[in-house]
Image (tube, helix red, strand yellow):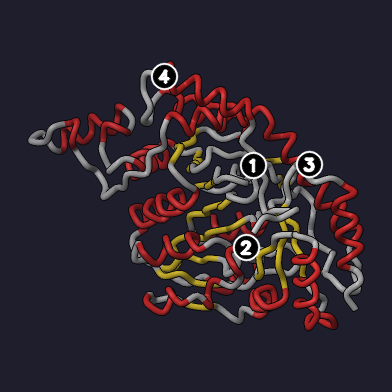
Amino acid sequence: MGFKWPLINDNITQGDREILADFCLNGERFTNGPKVKEFERVWSEWLGVKHSVMVNSGASANFISIAMVKELKGEGEVIVPPIGWVSDVSSVAQLGMTPVFVDVSLNDFNITAENIKNAITSKTKAIVLVHTLGFPAINKEIIELAKKHDLILIEDCCEAHGATYGGQRVGSFGDISLFSFYFGHHITTIEGGTVCVNDDKLYDLAKLFRSHGMTREASQELQREYELMCPDLNPLFTFAVAGFNMRSTELNAVLGIEQMKRLDYNIKCRQDNLDTWLSNLNPSIFITGFSVQGNSNFALPLIMQGATRDKLKDVCAILEEEGVEYRLGTAGGGNQARQPYLKKFPHRISGTLAQANYIHDNALYVGNHPELTKEQIINLCNKLNNVQ
């Protein structure tokens, strides 16, 4: 089915295609190489971090970050959000750690410092903080909690490119941050992502886990260390960790470098669209009081007010009549703690997930992309406001 208003528009331009075609015709190397390194440098400079490691997806970035936690801290618990993407949780479970769910706020879909604090035990190793739908989740209290309890703070910014807290871009606060460049995000490399760090040791670990654990991917210092430790091994094939093959290609990097030129414009368009959306929805029908400061909106959220929650079906009917694509439950389909895969893995819920369940049952989102017009958004809001 075609949609008049899809979740995402084709954000690969004719210029992008020509750049890719030229590289295909004239490039000398297509696997992870100099273009990947160039994109990593450009991305690090834009974000404000020391190091970026380009990988083949945001989900791969999730898995690498948890592998790094396990390597540094051993097995244990990782605090995760119930509203986010499946790989925020499945990476924890699959790698032998225990996901611990804490509830979110209706103001921004994000887990709160108070709920994180109540979930911390002697087994806790890390916090996965997702900036859900582009609403920044970071604050001083969460940063201090992580430091106080010696926890690795992971920022998942896969939906939040360019979101800020105190004027500083999210992804530059935590020990590790993750981005996705999947088709339809603020910037795309079709498939792709990054692991970003400021610490040199974490940088080495991220590169090791990206490429089979091979020491030749790491710094010269680490390579020499393993040559001395393992003189019987070929230095080209010494595997320091049980790594993955999650490398990117030069093609993905070429596209990313080109798309960086319009990233800030795309972010501003998405922010403006959210402002128009929230200022034109009826607050007696829909929740509109989101914490929008510093947002870099990924999708336009729609949550029913308590008195009108039984009208969600009517909202869906209007969206379908208008040809607007939507996703029930918002990010990742709603509460991840209700998904069947978790029955196979140890996990824990700290407190209740009342807010996450409310979002799961009474919310959805529609697409947000730079091509949307103000008139288009207002017209849809007016139709949605007819729900009584």
- In-image side of 364 versus 48 (left or right): right
User: What distance separates the C-alpha of mark 3 from that of mark 1?
Assistant: 16 Å
The label number, if any, that marks residue 27 in the structure image: 4
Q: Which of marks 3 and 4 is nearer the N terminus?
A: 4
At mark 1, the secondary structure is: loop
Q: Earlier in the sequence, mark 3 or mark 1?
A: 1
Question: Mark 2 = which residue?
Answer: 331
- In-image side of 75 versus 152 (left or right): left
Residue at the left extreme, as displayed: 232
User: What distance separates the C-alpha of mark 2 from that of mark 4?
Assistant: 38 Å
For discs 1 and 4, the disc positioned in front in the rendered view:
1
User: What distance separates the C-alpha of mark 2 from that of mark 3?
Assistant: 20 Å
Q: Tell me the amino acid under the disc marked 3.
A: Cys
Residue 233 position within the rendered picture, expressed as x and y whole percent measured from the top left? 11, 36
Q: Which of marks 1 and 4 is nearer the N terminus?
A: 1
Above or below for 343 versus 158: below
Q: Earlier in the sequence, mark 2 or mark 3?
A: 3
CB of mark 2 within 8 Å of CB of mark 4?
no
Question: Mark 1 = which residue?
Answer: 10
Above or below for 99 versus 26: below
Of residues 102 and 301, the one nearer the viewer is 301
Q: Which of marks 2 and 1 is nearer the N terminus?
A: 1
Question: Mark 3 = which residue?
Answer: 269
